[in-house]
Amino acid sequence: MEYQLPRLTKMWTHLERQSGGQVKGMGEKQIEVDKRILRTQIGVLKKELETVRKHRKQYRNRRTAVPVPVISLVGYTNAGKSTLLNQLTGANVLAEDQLFATLDPTTRRVQMKNGKEFLLTDTVGFIQKLPTTLVAAFRATLEEISESSLLVHVVDISHPLADQQIEAVEKVLSELDVSAIPKLIVWNKVDKASNPNEIKLEAAKRDDVVCISALTGEGLDDFCSAIQEKLKDIMVWIEALVPFDKGELLNTIHKVGMVEKTEYTEHGTMIKAHVPLRFAQLLTPFRQLSKSAAPV
């Protein structure tokens, strides 16, 4: 609507009548009415966006209380983000070959084979030269990205313009000021590429790239392993003595953290693990005074 507002003049030239002096034509009167209607609708939509933003913030605050890592799927439109979410979680999110098929972010819980869990969020796809007004309109949904522990940049590696699409996504991420969040790059649709073996060899040389096919499920185990390694890098090393009456706390450590060692003592369970930062803060009363470095 903001794009349409200054372009109304040319839409009503057929209503103008020949008249002299300062008398306005019918077209000009109609333009004034339409502009007023558009401005009113724009105001209503902006209020709705603000309401969406507040609701999403409440959801994020609720999720923060549960120390499960949040991972956001980002990428160019039609890169396969929704298909990947569906494959991992059975979420049944709309996955179509069309622009902005996903407008509302969907978050689902993913449980890996080793029992670890994380929350996976599907976000709106980006396009090249995304107008700043659209970035502002999507900000209510894209704010999900800012609360993420990790960004998964999904790339359609079979697309002939994959490099330009990667650049477009990076540009939008920099505009959203989330460049500091750790990132894992996923080369999707490798089964559709003309040179899949070369692509896999290239990905093997890099420690931040995983090759998958979200449609067939190829490479999803490698994807989950890479997620686990990336999460480990951003977790905090703790050594804590958990009392025996805090069994639920011990279960949570095993669920959201990466336990390296467990010892049972007369005073409780000594546990050494990598855990999310916000969960490490909850463990402060039980942490040991002498904290050794994380094992190599």
Image: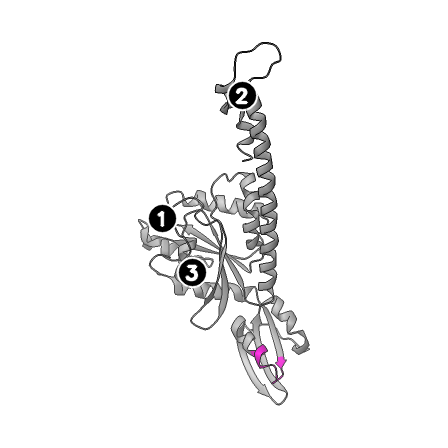
Q: Residue at 56%, 31% (x, y): give it.
A: 5
Classify 10 Å Cα crowding around label 3: few (below 14), some (14-19), many (20 and above).
some
Q: Residue at 37%, 61% (x, y): give it.
A: 219
Front position in the image: 243 or 65:
65
Pick whichever of labels 3 and 1 is earlier in the sequence: 3
| 3 and 1 marks in contact (CB < 8 Å) | no
Work out whether 282 lies above or below 145: below
Q: Amino acid at mark 3?
A: Ala
Mark 2 lies on a secondary structure that is helix
Classify 10 Å Cα crowding around label 2: few (below 14), some (14-19), many (20 and above).
some
Q: CA distance from mark 2 to mark 3?
A: 50 Å
* Image coordinates for residue 274, horizontal then vertical, percent: 56, 71
* Image coordinates for residue 30, horizontal then vertical, percent: 55, 25
Q: Residue furthest top?
A: 20
Magenta highlight on residue 245: yes
Pick whichever of labels 2 and 3 is earlier in the sequence: 2
Pick whichever of labels 1 and 2 is earlier in the sequence: 2
Q: Which numbered dot is residue 91?
A: 3
Q: Which residues are drawn in magenta?
A: 241-250
* Image coordinates for residue 111, horizontal then vertical, percent: 45, 68
Mark 1 lies on a secondary structure that is loop
**Circle 1 residue:** 158
Q: Residue furthest bottom?
A: 266
Q: Which numbered dot is residue 4?
A: none
Q: Which numbered dot is residue 27?
A: 2
Q: Nearer the viewer, mark 1 or mark 2?
A: 2
Q: CA distance from mark 3 to mark 1?
A: 25 Å
Q: Nearer the viewer, mark 3 or mark 1?
A: 3
